[in-house]
Image (cartoon, rainbow, N blue to C red):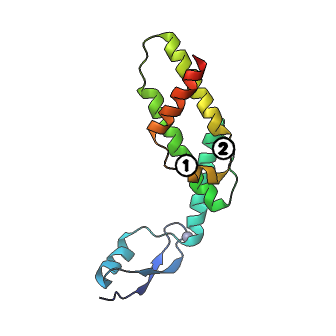
Amino acid sequence: MTKEIYDYEVRCMTCHKKFKTQLFESHEKNLWLVDKKDWYCETCKTEYFEKQTSKLAKSHAKIGFPALIGTPKRVSWAEKIRAELINKVSFLKKSLVFNDDKEKKISDLAFNLFLQEWQKKIEAKWWIDNRKITVRDISDRIKKLAGSLD
Ligand SMILES: [Zn+2]
């Protein structure tokens, strides 16, 4: 079965300019999409991603994470990954229970050392390559760091 491809004219939600887009569903479904979906032209899309990226970069700078190096597209993606991974660290930290103050102190130090390692990763590529890091991976590394402190 071959699918027909139609060009549809849609209007950008941000700048209200009309632009053409290709849709791949049935003509009826396409008309519904043209009407119901929020459309954004390429220029506004790029602007939106740049804004999102700089917002993330700013909040990361506050917690000691430097600006990333790479093409704008990569940096934009890497900032999102970095935000998710930092969230995983916070999640892990919150989930820990300690027997005593000494244990907590060592753990806090290990978390700091761990974050310092990440703060040195300034290539967008590193974050993209490591986007699959799990809470378990983070936990293993922090345990190792804590072990070296004990
Ligand atoms: Zn627009």
Residue type indicated by callout 2: Lys
Determine whether 92 is above or below 70 in the image.
above
Query: Tag 1's secondary structure?
Result: loop
Which of 25 and 121 lies nearest the eye of the viewer? 121
Which quarter of the figure has residue 111? top right
Q: Is disc 2 surrounded by few (<14), some (14 to 19) or many (20+) residues within 10 Å? A: some
Name the quadrant of the N terminus.
bottom left
Residue type indicated by callout 1: Asn
Which quarter of the figure has residue 35? bottom left
Which residue is found at the position 50% from the left and 36% from the top? 138
Ligand 1 falls in quadrant: bottom right
Percent x, y of residue 46: 59, 65
Precedes in sequence: disc 1 or disc 2: 2
Q: Please report contact status of discs 1 and 2: CB closer than 8 Å, yes or no.
A: no
Percent x, y of residue 95: 41, 27
* Number of residue marks: 2
What residue did someone put label 1 on?
A: 130
Which residue is found at the position 54% from the left and 44% from the top? 83
Residue 123 in view, yes or no = yes
Percent x, y of residue 89: 50, 35
Q: Is residue 106 left or right of residue 7?
A: right
Q: Is residue 88 left or right of residue 79?
A: left
Percent x, y of residue 40: 50, 69
Query: Tag 2's secondary structure?
Result: loop
Q: Is residue 117 left or right of residue 33?
A: right
Determine whether 79 is above or below 120 in the image.
below
Give the CA separation, mark 1 to mark 2.
Answer: 11 Å
Q: Is disc 1 surrounded by few (<14), some (14 to 19) or many (20+) residues within 10 Å? A: few
Residue 51 in view, yes or no = no
Which residue is found at the position 44% from the left and 81% from the top? 22
Q: Can you tell me whether the CB of the residue at mark 2 lies under 8 Å from the nearest atom of ligand 1?
A: no
Residue 121 image label: 2
